[in-house]
Image: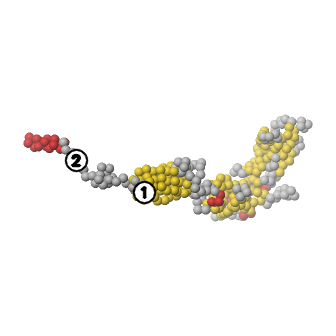
Amino acid sequence: MKLWLSIVVFCMATLSGCQWDPPRDNPLDPGSNAYHYPFGSLKVHVRTLIEQPIADATVLLPELERFAVTDSNGLAEFEEIPTGTWWIVAYRNLSGSDVYATDSAQVTITVKASSEMTMQLDGLPEIKTAYAYSVAFADSDTPIDPTYLIRLKSTVFDPDGVHHLLRVEAVLVDTLNDYSLAIDLRFNADSSFWWSDVPADSFHNDKTDNALFLPFTFRAFDAVGNASPPRTAFVARVLHGIVSLFNGSPPTHLEWTYPSFNELSDPSTFNYHVRIYVDIPPLEEIYWRIVVPRPSASGEHDVDIHLPVGIYLWDVLVLDNFGNSTRSPRLSFTVDGSN
């Protein structure tokens, strides 16, 4: 027993003074004779279709779980990328800024080389405003004309320029009655609006009454097929641009006419806002009251504060529950102390 114990102690003491030199044939081992540096670097320039740099774009190497964000010059840089062919994905989707569609490409990384490439992203169009006005036709001989139409109106922004926009559409879908209406809007270069008129009788039948309580959904499409996020607008419950008004007697008794019986829904879905201004630039609003419509096509209001002697302007704003509005022309009246 003592002999075996002596042999074990001797062997351990011998081995403790030895050094093990493993094989050095692993190409990833810097100490190997077969070692080579199996990495390269990569620069990615991200630009718009009109060759402008895109800052704050995300550039991904998904297979390697690597990413970078472009600087103010649209540049993203990667170091120590393994050799091989890899997918690159770039996009920008930041809240409050222009959105650019996702694009992808492949790049080949070679040993100790710096690869460089440019990716061009398509800016997504954005619906900035969307309206569905009710517009009535009237002339001096016929101040109230029941003929009206729905005017669809929108402003659209595309980071690549208005020339890159292909079309803008507004769609109304009534799933309850299995009815839909799709309208292509036209661009007006003078006003920069996209618009189209839809006759109101397009809605008036037994199946489409419900459609008047549904929104139009606006979307814009660019030349390469990308679409904007949708934006909705309800049909206005006020008729656009046809309020007439006049001063009563005394001057602080105000009267106006408005064809409320031509409304597309119950008149209780809108209100009058009577406003008075001091007629001295800059225009200052000094009075504002909400007046509930009555069944007739006329309205009136007695100013309930004392107005000092002077010249005033007044108007009536008609506002519906969806935020659509129309405003009368402003008229003036004078308070001279004699009334």
Give the mark nearest the N terminus, 2 or 1. 2
- Residue 127 seen in the figure: no
The quadrant holding residue 2 is top left
What residue is shown with label 2? Answer: 20
Residue at the image point whose x is 25% and y is 52% from the top: 23
How is the protein colored in the picture? secondary structure
Location of residue 308 by image quarter: top right
Rate crowding at label 1 as few (under 14), some (14 to 19) or many (20 or more) other CA atoms within 10 Å.
Answer: many
Counting from the top left corner in percent of width and height, residue 328 is at: 80, 49
Which secondary structure lies at badge 2?
loop
Residue lying at 68% horizontally and 56% vertically, measured from the top left: 154
Relative horizontal placement of residue 225, taking residue 292 as reference (left or right): left
At horizontal 82% and vertical 47% (from top left) the residue drawn is 330
Q: Rate crowding at label 2 as few (under 14), some (14 to 19) or many (20 or more) other CA atoms within 10 Å.
A: few
Query: Residue 10: horizontal and vertical position, in percent?
Result: 13, 42
Instruction: Report the Cα–Cα distance between label 2 and label 1.
Output: 36 Å
- Which residue has dot 1 on it? 109
Mark 1: which amino acid? Ile
Secondary structure found at label 1 = strand
* Rendered position, 305 above or below 269: above
The residue lying toward the viewer, choosing from 212 and 192, is 192
Q: Residue at x 75, y 48 (%)?
A: 271
**Is residue 245 or residue 210 the one in the foreground?**
245
Amino acid type, residue under disc 2 in the picture: Trp
